[in-house]
Image (tube, rainbow, N blue to C red):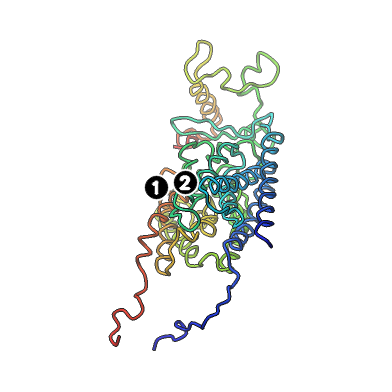
């Protein structure tokens, strides 16, 4: 095969792959699922990978949404993300995110006598 | 009596055996395909777009640099495509386009052309790019953070991270067969152990990778991991776990044996591979990174010129009857 022909083939394959890559990145981008599967909390004390599906699904712990998403007790609708109200720093109307999550996760684990309660059991230190 | 066969050289004219950079590159791509297909099968379109974009960007950067440096166009030799493919294999399926674009540039420019192009690079180009991405944008290559929206029916926590942070009990559900069949999270082309082993054996049989390097790398991993595991089984993982998780198999068969960044003599090859395996487990066990392969490979790449100083005695030198 001539060098020129080989080069043309290389250009064509590269062009096709580039166009496919661009199309897939723009038009076929995977949207986040409506209900989170896992949530990755970043923290200076070590990140935490929370298995949301494992806690919420019937095949997992089957915990009702309102048990954690306490705003559902007052208003019907979709649960909102923790970070929408619980911010990184203290706010007037809601405890800061780290405190809220610690209280919720650790509190439930201690109350139920199941699940990790030590720092190193959840935080990737 | 010396082996006379070693010194037989036939008279000219000679006949080229047909080997070329291009054939070698295509063999690499062929060998990598099973692992890449498994990644695309598992993660779907997101994985495909990373592979397609990485390969095409690497080739386009190569073409651009050829033109900018007024060098002959080298994209036909397939080396840039191999670099792009290997980089994509190490990335998570969710890698953003800009990270792939920058990674491909880093691999081709910083990993390869800064040193003079093919055959001159002291470090493995895809590893250089991955290390740069890892140090610059940690979240992009943090598999736990990157793959939160995927549920493939098995434990999706990144196995080396689970072992490092939560001990051996956190990874006891992973089976050897499951790991070999890709039932673990990780890079697009790093999880399908069986495919990587098959591809690696193909490269060894085709003569593109010297068996001494992957064999000593794997031995280094197994021996070092065994020592750690015996010292504290609750904290350190089993040797086979270290071998089948992270980027270990990809590095063993596709990355550390790269020609210009690995030794050419047999004893240095053994030392090079064993040192790589030792450093990988050392970084995983007492370092700060869950997967030590990236920096272990770059460190042994740096050691390569020094290791290659161990060479056979020159013919005739020091002989009593010379």
Q: Which is more toward the observer, B174 or B115?
A: B115
Q: What residue is shown at x 33% (from left), y 81% (from top)?
A: B316
Q: With respect to residue B247, does A57 lie above or below?
A: above
Residue B89 screen position, x and y as percent: 59, 49
Q: Which is more toward the observer, B6 or B153?
A: B6
The mark tally for this picture is 2
Q: Which quadrant would residue B74 be assigned to in this image?
A: bottom right
Q: With respect to residue B25, does A96 lie above or below?
A: above
State which chain disc 2 sits on: B
Left of A95 or right of it: where is A19?
right
Residue B72 screen position, x and y as percent: 55, 54
Q: Which quadrant would residue B227 be assigned to in this image?
A: bottom left
- Camera-side mark, 2 or 1: 2
The Cα atoms of the two marked residues, 2 and 1, are separated by: 29 Å
**Which residue carries the number 2 mark?**
B110
Please state, as top left, top right, bottom left or bottom right, where the N terminus of chain A lies in the image: bottom right
Residue B152 screen position, x and y as percent: 66, 43
Q: With respect to residue A79, does A49 lie above or below?
A: below
State which chain disc 1 sits on: B
Q: Dot 1: few (<14), some (14–19), or many (≥20) neighbours within 10 Å?
A: few
**Which residue carries the number 1 mark?**
B286
Q: Dot 2: few (<14), some (14–19), or many (≥20) neighbours within 10 Å?
A: some
Residue A88 screen position, x and y as percent: 49, 21
């Amino acid at each position: 095969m001539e060098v020129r022909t080989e080069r043309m083939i290389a250009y064509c394959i590269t062009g096709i792959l580039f166009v496919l890559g661009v199309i897939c990145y723009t038009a076929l981008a995977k949207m986040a699922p409506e209900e989170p599967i896992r949530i990755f909390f970043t923290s200076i004390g070590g990140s935490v990978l929370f298995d949301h599906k494992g806690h919420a699904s019937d095949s997992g712990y089957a915990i009702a949404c309102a048990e954690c998403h306490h705003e559902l007790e007052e208003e019907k609708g979709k649960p909102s993300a923790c970070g929408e109200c619980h911010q990184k720093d203290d706010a007037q109307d809601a405890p800061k995110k780290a405190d809220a999550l610690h209280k919720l996760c650790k509190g439930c684990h201690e109350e139920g006598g199941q699940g990790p309660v030590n720092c190193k059991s959840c935080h990737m230190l | 009596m010396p082996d006379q066969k070693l010194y037989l050289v036939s008279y000219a004219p000679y006949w080229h055996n047909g080997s070329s950079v291009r054939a070698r590159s295509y063999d690499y791509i062929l060998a990598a395909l099973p692992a890449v297909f498994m990644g695309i099968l598992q993660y779907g379109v997101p994985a495909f777009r990373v592979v397609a974009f990485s390969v095409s960007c690497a080739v386009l950067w190569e073409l651009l640099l050829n033109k900018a440096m007024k060098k002959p166009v080298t994209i036909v030799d397939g080396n840039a495509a191999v670099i792009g493919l290997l980089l994509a294999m190490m990335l998570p399926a969710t890698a953003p386009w800009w990270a792939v674009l920058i990674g491909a540039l880093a691999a081709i420019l910083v990993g390869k052309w800064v040193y003079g192009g093919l055959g001159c690079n002291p470090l493995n180009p895809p590893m250089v790019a991955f290390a740069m991405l890892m140090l610059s944008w940690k979240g992009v290559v943090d598999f736990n953070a990157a793959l939160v929206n995927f549920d493939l029916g098995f434990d999706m926590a990144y196995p080396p991270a689970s072992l490092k942070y939560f001990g051996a009990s956190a990874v006891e559900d992973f089976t050897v067969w499951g790991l070999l069949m890709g039932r673990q999270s990780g890079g697009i082309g790093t999880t399908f152990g069986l495919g990587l082993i098959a591809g690696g054996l193909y490269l060894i049989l085709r003569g593109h990778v010297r068996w001494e390097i992957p064999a000593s790398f794997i031995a280094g991993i197994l021996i070092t991991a065994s020592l750690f595991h015996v010292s504290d089984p609750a904290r350190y993982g089993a040797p086979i776990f270290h071998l089948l998780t992270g980027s270990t198999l990809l590095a063993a068969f596709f990355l550390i044996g790269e020609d210009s960044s690995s030794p050419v003599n047999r004893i240095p090859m053994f030392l090079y591979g064993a040192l790589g395996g030792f450093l990988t487990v050392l970084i995983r066990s007492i370092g700060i990174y869950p997967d030590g392969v990236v920096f272990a490979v770059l460190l042994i790449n740096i050691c390569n010129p020094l290791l290659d100083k161990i060479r056979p005695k020159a013919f005739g030198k020091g002989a009593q009857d010379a």
